[in-house]
Image: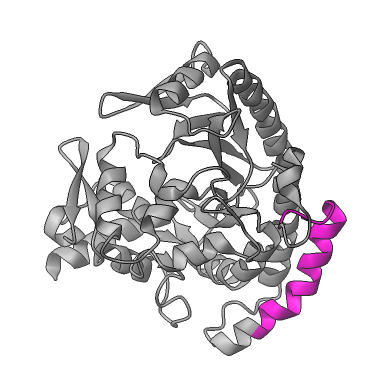
Amino acid sequence: MAKLDEQIRTMKGYFEADCEAEGKLSLGLEVEHFVTHSDGRAVTFAQLQAALRELQQQGDAPVISESEYLGFRAPALSAVIGPACQLKITMTPQRDVQDIMDSYNRFYLQLCLTLAACGLRAWTVGYHPTQRAEALPLIPQNCAEALDRYFKNTGACGGQMLRATAATRLSIDYFSEQDFVRKMRAASLLTPFFVLLSDNAPVYQTSRNSAYGISARVRQDVDRDRCGVIPHLMDPDFGFARYAETVLTKPQIVAWRTNRAKAVGSKTAPELYGAHISRREAAQVLSMFFYDVRLKSRIELCAADCMPPRYVAAYLHTIFPTLNAMLSAQLLAASNTFLSVKISLMFFPMFMRAFFMTSKPLLLNPSVKPVLNNPANF
């Protein structure tokens, strides 16, 4: 227990150090894309590596893991290959939504042109459009392989989450522990609305999909220890220490040992790390949890599907006015779950109006529109 208590104090200190000054908060964006051949065949790891090397500019830093090239980091963004050859584009945080979307749109255009020259294409959907999850091989990385093995014993959909889902993730700063708690609660309560508005999976396991929120349903059947809503969110003592205790006492699956990722199964952080957990070790711990809203160095909202750029922009322009309105109401500090749910429902009409004023309706679900015959929607 003494080691765990020290690890909790250390991780809490990291969370406190990540607080930003009030009034200087920024926004981060991460979008995952599936990449296939133009005819829908799955791309190979080597083919995607070659395309990213073509896209990398002089001065960009290569991302190397376990002796494999995974992508690059540029001043405005990083582009890194995911567990089953998804392409993860992570934008450098900025304070203005339009600035971050301008950077993303410029890079997305370059990406599409580079992929087309290689006979490839990027997709903007939440579930793989042309392949069943089990047909998609994992890249040669210990972390992906360890997660895949572990999830076979925790739920029915771990392989699907790793291989066949693609998300739009937003990250936001916090300026204090109280601000962190209120934003975690507000974002978690609004998550069902985020799922509904971003629902973009016209195909599921190569069949036409008419169900809503399929990516969210997949996440619900992966691993209860690390998916869904963070435990104790509405408890009066929820905060940095409670979040740290939750992630430190759950099975780690993969740990950072001797400068590399190593499969460790169900061992917990006190069994794996010293009392004073390092920043790098703490980052590894936090990366192993996939809650709808999670904390790393920033608060991440993870529930939205991958979408075309214009809908990503609408999503960003919608979320932050809604969250700010909820927070300014000074009501999310309450720990009463029923009251908080009523509050979030009260703000839902404003959320919907903001989205549809910003963009045309998201007619991406095949129960609404036959998108399979309209590649422009992807």
Residue 13 falls left or right of residue 49: left
The residue located at (36%, 39%) in the rendering is: 137
The quadrant the N terminus occupies is bottom left
Residue 283 colored in magenta in the image: no
Q: Relative to 30, is 16 on the left or the right?
A: left
Q: Quadrant of residue 82?
A: top left
User: Residue 324: x, y in percent?
Assistant: 70, 64
Identify the residue shown where x is 44% and y is 49%: 133
Q: Nearer the viewer, residue 5 or 320?
A: 320
Query: Does the image show residue 36?
Result: yes
Identified at 37% across, 58% down, the residue is: 158
Q: Is residue 353 magenta?
A: yes
The one of 319 and 163 positioned closer to us in this rendering: 163
Percent across and percent down for residue 11 are: 31, 57
| Residue 14 visible within the image | no
x then y, percent, for residue 304: 60, 56
> In the rendering, at what x and y percent does residue 314 appear?
76, 50
Whether 20 is drawn above or below 50: the answer is below
Q: From what the image shows, is residue 66 above or below residue 201?
A: above
- Tell me which segment is drawn in magenta: 342-365
Task: Report the magenta stretch's main SS.
Answer: helix
- x 45%, y 68%: residue: 220
Of all residues shown, which one is farthest toward the right? 357
The one nearer the camera, 114 or 185, is: 114
Q: In the rendered view of the protein, which quadrant contains the C terminus?
A: top right
